[in-house]
Image: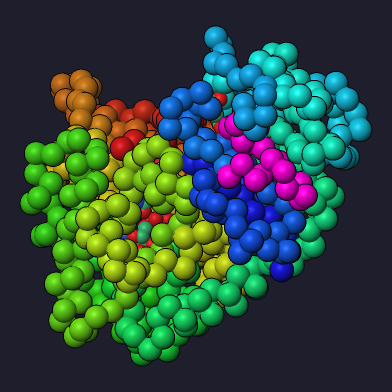
Amino acid sequence: MDKILILDFGGQTSQLIGRRIRDAGVYAEIIHGDTELTDQILTSDVKGLILSGSPYSVYEEGSPRPDKKVYSLDIPVLGICYGLQVTTWENGGKVAPLHTKEYGRSAIRYRKTDCPLLKDIPDNFVSWMSHGDSLDELAPGFDLVAESEHDLPAIVENREKGFWGLQFHPEVTHCEYGSRILENFAVHICGASKGWSMDKYVEDAAERLKKQVGNEKVLLLISGGVDSTVAGGLLLKSLDPKNIYLMYIDTGMMRKNETEKVSENLKKLGAENLLIIDARDRFLGPLEGISDPETKRKSIGDTFIRVQEEEIAKHISGDYFLAQGTLYTDLIESGKGVGNKAGVIKSHHNVGTPLVEGKRKEGKIVEPLDMLYKDEVRRLGLLLGIEEKIVYRHPFPGPGLGIRIIGDVTEEKCDILREADSIYIEELHKRGLYSRIWQAFAVLLPVRSVGVTGDAREYGYVLALRAVVSHDGMTADVFDFPTKDLLEISSLITNKVKEIGRVVYDISSKPPSTIEWE
Ligand SMILES: Nc1ncnc2c1ncn2[C@@H]1O[C@H](COP(=O)(O)OP(=O)(O)OP(=O)(O)O)[C@@H](O)[C@H]1O
Ligand SMILES: O=c1[nH]c(=O)c2[nH+]cn([C@@H]3O[C@H](COP(=O)(O)O)[C@@H](O)[C@H]3O)c2[nH]1
Ligand SMILES: NC(=O)CC[C@H](N)C(=O)O
Ligand SMILES: [Mg+2]
């Protein structure tokens, strides 16, 4: 199949480049940015190359470099942000830090109109920037195609050499015409044919699973959330169900009635071996007195695997594969992206813990969704026939309420938050708001404030409500909550949960804030 190869230098949005190209129906694959471009890699199927962004600056020691061959290939190359900067730097141009960095939206002004990347795209479209360095001087042979609204180089080309460069990120959804620019590159410039679809992904994944696992047993940790349920559906479809064990762990930091609801849903998936583990008394002990978010995450992650290992020993003797519904976002935010050069934002409980990494080293981890983003997983779920109710559930992180109770976690605080969160979510359903929001939840703050009820002084906790809209969790905007609903929900919560004295609404987008508070 024709494909576009992406060299990843560790940019936070590198994987999205592949996503967008696959959305256009062209197969795309990501490899480490510094991979040697041998003939085995540059097969005749490869119709074009993309160099991704990076947290590094080209003038920094140790910053990643592509194989020099990329500058003399006879297939087209597109450099995005760092990818453009490194090409400029290595071909005789200049790159320098900016005094005022360019972050967020910026209109693009054409200086040339015949660039094939810009086919069917009007002048002045709004791009999305995220860089602190800029091209001070173009490399010889390169022409300026467009500038940003701050008069900085935004698009360049060297048509003779088949090189195009963008200073902005066409892969993020905030970039107008971003998908079309990538499609113009893949289809119009590289001439790649459209052979990729989700049906094909299911076929390929089934084949890969059969080859990797064969007739061995597989244990899938399943939360009832979208990712692991879809992973479960895929495993059950691809492998012999009698070898598949689904294990749900109640950590004591689950939402109200979660275990009952999840057990019901998982039964419908058709698994032969469904294990529902009550480990409520195992998680809180090790968390006592810990308030640092990363330490909490590691503690929960380790307990997860300890519980799982003990429980599985009761059901499977000998070796087995550990399956997880890990998505690419989990990997990249934990600094384990394909390029391995991404910065650590937060450690997801299912990535990077010593026990999980041990399994990974043994080659005993199965993560069939690790190249996909949330919205792709949802499409896959529908394709596998998984109920819409599950497919469109808001994400719920593995560490659960543990990372939504800021500061130390206690059973009492879990109960308070469980109650408040359930009122909040139930109201969203009743008011027809749930499906308009990508993710909503409540956060219990370690702050108390003074109130007055029935003429008496109160001293209650502060609860923050969060609701965001997003495509893939990588960026998010605050949900424009109807004020009337917000006020009514606030008073319902303070009336019903006596420990909560005040409710606030979180108005921060991602970036700069993350969706969860920890
Ligand atoms: N309570 C749990 N019991 C067993 N496994 C879990 C539990 N919570 C999380 N996991 C594992 O960790 C993985 C990552 O969790 P994550 O929350 O990202 O995915 P999910 O729960 O499947 O989907 P969603 O994002 O919709 O909540 C899951 O796919 C699952 O393998
Ligand atoms: O399984 C998970 N384990 C985790 O440790 C974890 N941390 C965050 N999330 C979810 O990921 C998405 C992006 O979250 P952040 O903006 O907070 O990084 C949001 O949907 C978060 O709920 C997690 N999911
Ligand atoms: N997003 C990027 O690729 C950034 C590249 C480089 N670190 C800069 O700040 O300009
Ligand atoms: Mg979850």
Q: Quadrant of ligand 3?
A: top right
Q: Quadrant of residue 115?
A: top right
Tell whether position 70 is magenta.
yes
Q: From the viewer's side, name the closer residue of 363 and 428.
A: 363
Q: From the viewer's side, name the closer residue of 160 and 99.
A: 160
Task: Let me know if residue 49 appears in the view.
Answer: yes
Q: Quadrant of the C terminus?
A: top left
Tell whether position 384 is magenta.
no
Q: Quadrant of residue 222?
A: bottom left
Q: Residue at x 57, y 20 (%)?
A: 133
In the image: residue 347, left or right of residue 90: left
Rendered position, 390 above or below 157: below
Q: Residue at x 67, y 22 (%)?
A: 93
Rendered position, 33 above or below 392: above
Task: Let me know if residue 129 appears in the view.
Answer: no
In the image: residue 70, left or right of residue 357: right
Question: Hey, which residue is sitting farthest right in the picture?
Answer: 114
Count of number-bearing discs: 0
Q: From the viewer's side, name the closer residue of 202 and 430.
A: 202
Give the extent of the magenta segment: 67-86
In the image: residue 270, left or right of residue 193: left
Residue 51: x and y, percent?
62, 42
Residue 335: x and y, percent?
38, 44
Residue 256: x and y, percent?
29, 56
Q: From the viewer's side, name the closer residue of 409 and 495.
A: 409
In the image: residue 194, left or right of residue 408: right
Residue 250: x and y, percent?
23, 63
Q: Residue at x 30, y 52 (%)?
A: 352
Q: Quadrant of residue 324?
A: bottom left
Q: Quadrant of the N terminus?
A: bottom right
Q: Residue at x 25, y 32 (%)?
A: 445
